[in-house]
Amino acid sequence: MAVQLAFDVRIYGEQLDSIPQDLYIPPDALAVYLEAFEGPLDLLLYLIRKHNLDILDIPMAQLTSQYMEYVEKMRESRLELAAEYLLMSAMLIEIKSRMLLPKPETLEQEEDPRAELVRRLMEYEAIKLAAERLDALPQAGREIQVARAYYEHIAEASWPEVSFDELMVAWQSVLKRASHFQHHRVGRAELSVREHMSLVLRRLQQESLVEFTQLFDVVNDGMPKLVVYFLAILELAREGLVRITQQVAFSPIYLQAADTPATLQGT
Amino acid sequence: MSEPQTIAEMKQVLEAVLLTAGEPLSLEMLLRPFAGGMERATLRMLLDELRQEWQGRSMELVQVNSGWRFQARADLAPFIVRLNPERPARYSRAALETLAIIAYRQPVTRGDIEEIRGVVVNPNIMRQFMERNWIDIVGQKEVPGRPSLYATTKTFLDDFGLRSLSELPPMQQFTEQEIQPDLL
Amino acid sequence: MSEPQTIAEMKQVLEAVLLTAGEPLSLEMLLRPFAGGMERATLRMLLDELRQEWQGRSMELVQVNSGWRFQARADLAPFIVRLNPERPARYSRAALETLAIIAYRQPVTRGDIEEIRGVVVNPNIMRQFMERNWIDIVGQKEVPGRPSLYATTKTFLDDFGLRSLSELPPMQQFTEQEIQPDLL
């Protein structure tokens, strides 16, 4: 019976479909052939199949001698023999010898010395078959082709999220590093002032010249807001960001951004 | 197009989303394009209609572990494969056996795999499956050395077109084979 | 399916190939699946028929520089984009500090910010907050070079859910905070 190989074996470039029936195998070919085994369990399974042995009642003497024969051939051809093969040799010989021992009748029936080997062979065989079936399943990229047509990635404006806390932590680290701000405190009042500084500047961008009293909505803004506005203007003046001008005493006071051309002054 | 209103428009959105995805999409993901404007029940219904409409056409809408995807009808795949002459590498027998052990016996340690196969596990084999995201480490076994426990991933199921592990081909026992020795 | 014989079968192969390719396919590439069994003229004709069949549907078959591809209809793209909300990158520490300085110390020039932070301000940082309309220029400082004065905007307040800047958490020194944590 020519045993079909489930894998590619090539000798001198020629495909080897079946393992030669005669025992003599050229050493080079043997190397390829033995390397095709995945390990001692694989080799044992092959021998059991080849010689049509009953796995549930393995003739240990026969299997052991056949196994040793292969292992010997591997050594003769100076193949690097994996330690697992030698370990298996020892195990087979041990099982064989245990089976030769006369069973003491008085003791409870002892477990068959072959039981563990049989269990392992069956488990390995099951996995071997499972591996083949797994490989036969359709696989993405091989038999399964997934739809992946094109679409225009329109950059939807997506901005990073920022929280209060992050902003605060950032400000904190600025303060920690900047020594001249060491004792700086920003309270709510000061934040309001700075906000209104920006508001005043914004307004001065649109109307280059604003009469002082027009900045205040005396009717609607409460006193605190008016104070904040006033402080904002003072701070702007102090920082040189606005110019405050008055032609003569008691005439209207005008505000303009410091960067406004001077010609507008006093209009 | 403003937010899709009609069933036809919704199905077009769904179809476009699935045909461009390149991976399975869960129901949660498929709801996103509708920005809260669709119920899960409606979505299921539309998916089912879409699946039926595509029946017998070039692509089929299938459900795998992570969700829904369009894939080429199986009998068309051989023609698509011709497009890229470099055929995808097949895995070695050692690799496939290792994968089968992880798939069928998970979670397993390397030691478990070595015991079943009777040989040392090549670390490259584990690495290649980890890189492909077919297996990953799901824990440590409470034995000396605390070895890693390996299991298959959702991607593994998706790539094999499975909805769950129970859809893997059942394991066949050695003795069942015994009846037909000529198969060997 | 054996080699496609009918026009319908050929079109199915073409459609599946184009929908799964992930890139535009040239005529040469589109001939490969037919393994020599198709003329260029036939291919062109089939592509044209396919293009017409898809008109008004979710995808359109278009010819771009390097070949043919299916693409989602332009008006459907915005819905597809929602599928993968690009995880907004976080602002760098430098950007956040710059924003904090503008918020707490406005109106400020870039020079002011640089003085406070002790390093040069990357113009891109200012630009990204300008584009987001969180800051704008409220004037120029009357010093050499007339640098722009930056301040936060109404959009900034809206986005942070504030009615006014005074609702920003007031800042104190770290050490004082620890003494009076309730003040925060």
Image: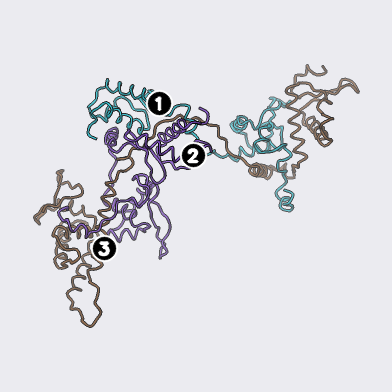
Chain colours: A brown, B purple, C cyan
Depth order, front residue of C175/C177: C177
| Three-letter code, disc 1 | Glu
| Three-letter code, disc 2 | Leu
Q: Secondary structure at mark 3?
A: helix
- Write down the residue under mark 2: B31
| Residue A44, image quadrant | bottom left
Please tell me which residue is depicted at 25% across the width and 53% down the height of the picture: A129
Q: Secondary structure at mark 1?
A: strand
- Write down the residue under mark 3: A120
Chain letter of mark 2 equals B
Q: Nearer the viewer, mark 2 or mark 3?
A: 2
Figure quadrant of the C terminus of chain A: top right
Q: Give the percent coordinates (x, y) of residue B81.
A: 28, 35
The CA span between labels 3 and 1 is 57 Å
| Residue C90, image quadrant | top right
Chain letter of mark 3 equals A
Please tell me which residue is depicted at 80% across the width and 19% down the height of the picture: A265
- Decide if residue B174 is on the left or right side of residue B101: left
| Three-letter code, disc 3 | Arg
The CA span between labels 2 and 1 is 23 Å
When the figure is inspected, residue A235 is found, relative to residue A113, above or below; the finding is: above
Q: Nearer the viewer, mark 2 or mark 1?
A: 2
- Write down the residue under mark 1: C60
Please tell me which residue is depicted at 70% across the width and 25% down the height of the picture: C146
